[in-house]
Image: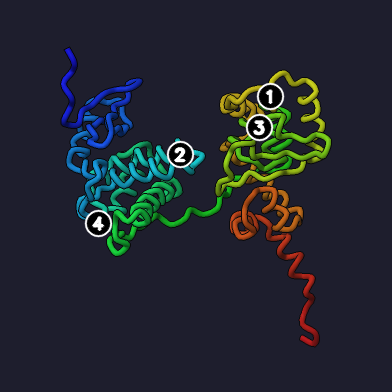
Amino acid sequence: MARPKRTVPWLETRNGVYYVYWPQSDSPKPGKLSLRTKDASEAQDRFAAFLIERGRFMSAPTPKDALTVELALSDYRREHVEVKVVDVDRVDFAISNLIQYFGPMGIIDIDIPCCREYRRRREAGEIGRPSGSGTIRRELGVLVAAIHHEVKWKRLPKTSAPFIEKPPRPGPRERWLSKDEVSRLISAASGRTRLFIQLAYYTASRKSALFELTWFQVDMANRNINLLRDGRAQTNKKRPIVPIDDELYIPLKEAYDNRSTEWVLGNSGDVKSSFNTAAKRAGIKDVSPHVLRHTRAVHLAQDKIDLFTIAGLLGDSVATVERNYLHHCPNHIRDELQKSGGLTGA
């Protein structure tokens, strides 16, 4: 006996994730939308929200006062993030936290007290793990982007877009290592962890780029490394082509001659545990892999390398380098100022 044709939306799971389906008059196939959860209770809440706002997905306009934050974030993810963004997981993390507080709220109802309450809850760990102003600022930036997305797609009048108050931009990181500390850290490590530290310092690259680095991106003959692999879009966190420093060339050449996989580090796994072990063995506290990028920039600035060159290595703007690293180099600034000489006759 044939199953009767469905006339109302329904729920199904695929690989444990809940999806909502609905009949379409112009197609034999049903419409489909992921609810992005495996939790039954949460799926029911999102299904209820879908039933209220289903006109958005079933070709009926949604009044501007019914446009919720969760729906805007869903539109933004489906129509922009999945299409254009490389690091989808990072955006999903922000969306997950934003929905916990703003989800059912109408976009036009967001105000400054709401933004400040979200910040308080994120800092206190009431939503996700306790986070600092930098993380919260990025998450609220995703909310801003989602709202602008709805404006661009003419689902929300520009005049109805609320002001989103974000925490102030955090100050520059102060932690960096001396050259002696870097040498001790390298000596305390071994194998792929040691090569990772050398790569992280001399290329001033972020760890994600190094874990993904393959030998196809390394030009040993011309001593260059292209940190952007084929097929990966360039993002705001640029991955430039960087030179292989003379001190990096020797260990990198040894690794190249003994390579057994396509990965420069042998595999794409993290080195968090072995890095922490090396730091402890070297007697260095409060250090993470990202500190090596910061350290390299500071050392170059202290060695009076011009800011344009440092910016090229980091893939940053000169303004960013000036803001984050120049304050570590008062002696360099003093030396440069002294070139102007004194006042004659004073």
Q: Which of pointers 2 and 3 lies earlier in the amino acid sequence?
A: 2
- CA gap, disc 2 to disc 3? 20 Å
Asked whether 123 or 17 is in front, the reply is 17
Q: Are marks 2 and 4 in contact (CB under 8 Å)?
A: no
- CA gap, disc 2 to disc 1? 26 Å
- CA gap, disc 2 to disc 4? 26 Å
- The residue carrying mark 4 is 108
CA neighbours of label 2 inside 10 A, class few (<14), some (14 to 19), many (20+):
few
Q: Is residue 261 above or below residue 219?
A: above
- CA gap, disc 3 to disc 1? 9 Å
Q: Position of residue 69 (x, y in %)?
A: 28, 47
Q: Which of pointers 2 and 1 lies earlier in the amino acid sequence?
A: 2
Q: Are marks 4 and 3 in contact (CB under 8 Å)?
A: no
Disc 3 marks a residue whose amino acid type is Leu
Element assignment for label 1: loop
Q: Which of pointers 4 and 1 lies earlier in the amino acid sequence?
A: 4
Element assignment for label 2: helix
- The residue carrying mark 2 is 90
CA neighbours of label 3 inside 10 A, class few (<14), some (14 to 19), many (20+):
many
- The residue carrying mark 3 is 213
- The numbered mark at residue 23 is none
- The residue carrying mark 1 is 262
Q: Residue at x 33, y 22 (%)?
A: 14
